[in-house]
Image (spheres, rainbow, N blue to C red):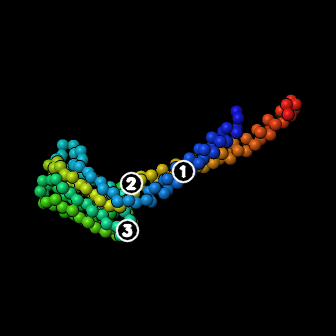
């Protein structure tokens, strides 16, 4: 086993793991205008004709505008609720921002009070179809921060491997030089 080769390989893996860790930290912070279109309703539960569809709006910066539009439904057959939520959850955490039973295609624009995610519930009676459009500025890589712990573990593990093989390769080079000198090859 030549530890010099392993040193280079572990060094490359260390750099890759540091890049991965950097991406899991930096990319979720880059927010750009997004336009998400959802068609509903979701799959009904059991034999019910009333369906609750939930949608997640990733972390929106405080002071930025969020627009939620609902179109293409039977008048009075859907209820819509927009509310603050917790990270990764579609459960209400506070007073709804918007709660309505629209009779025509409608839209709501609000300014985020805090840096937080939002949730949208659409209750569809008689499995009425609808189109939900969400326009907001958030990171399309919001899911990457869940892998930050893997990036830390990978960086630590490959850093330890790199340190070990760097030390081993120096020792191996000295041993090989001593073997060649003992054989009289130099």
Disc 1 element: helix
Q: Earlier in the sequence, mark 3 or mark 2?
A: 3
Select label 1 or label 3 by which is in front. 1
Select label 3 or label 2 by which is in front. 2
The location of residue 70, given as percent across then percent down, is 20, 57
Disc 3 element: loop
The location of residue 73, given as percent across then percent down, is 15, 53
Say which quarter of the image contains residue 45: top left
Q: Is residue 23 left or right of residue 87?
A: right
Residue 19 is labelled as 1
Disc 2 to disc 1, C-alpha distance: 18 Å
Could you say which is closer to the camera, residue 180 or residue 157? Answer: 180
Say which quarter of the image contains residue 172: top right
Q: Tell me the residue that label 3 is attached to.
A: 62
Q: Earlier in the sequence, mark 1 or mark 3?
A: 1
Q: Tell me the residue that label 2 is attached to.
A: 140
Say which quarter of the image contains residue 171: top right
């Amino acid at each position: 086993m030549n530890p010099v080769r392993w040193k280079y390989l572990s060094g490359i893996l260390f750099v890759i793991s540091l890049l991965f860790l950097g991406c899991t930290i930096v990319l979720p912070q880059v927010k750009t205008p997004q336009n998400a279109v959802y068609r509903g309703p979701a799959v009904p539960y059991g034999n019910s004709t009333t369906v609750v569809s939930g949608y997640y709006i990733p972390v929106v910066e405080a002071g930025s505008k969020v627009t939620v539009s609902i179109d293409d439904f039977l008048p009075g057959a859907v209820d819509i609720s927009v509310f603050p939520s917790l990270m990764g959850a579609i459960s209400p955490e506070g007073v709804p921002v918007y709660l309505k039973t629209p009779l025509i295609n409608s839209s709501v624009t609000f300014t985020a009070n805090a840096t937080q995610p939002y949730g949208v519930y659409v209750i569809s009676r008689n499995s009425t179809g609808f189109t939900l459009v969400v326009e907001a500025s958030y990171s399309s890589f919001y899911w990457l921060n869940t892998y930050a712990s893997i990036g830390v573990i990978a960086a630590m593990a490959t850093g330890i491997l790199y340190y070990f093989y760097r030390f081993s390769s120096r020792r191996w080079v000295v041993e090989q030089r001593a073997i060649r000198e003992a054989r009289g090859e130099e």
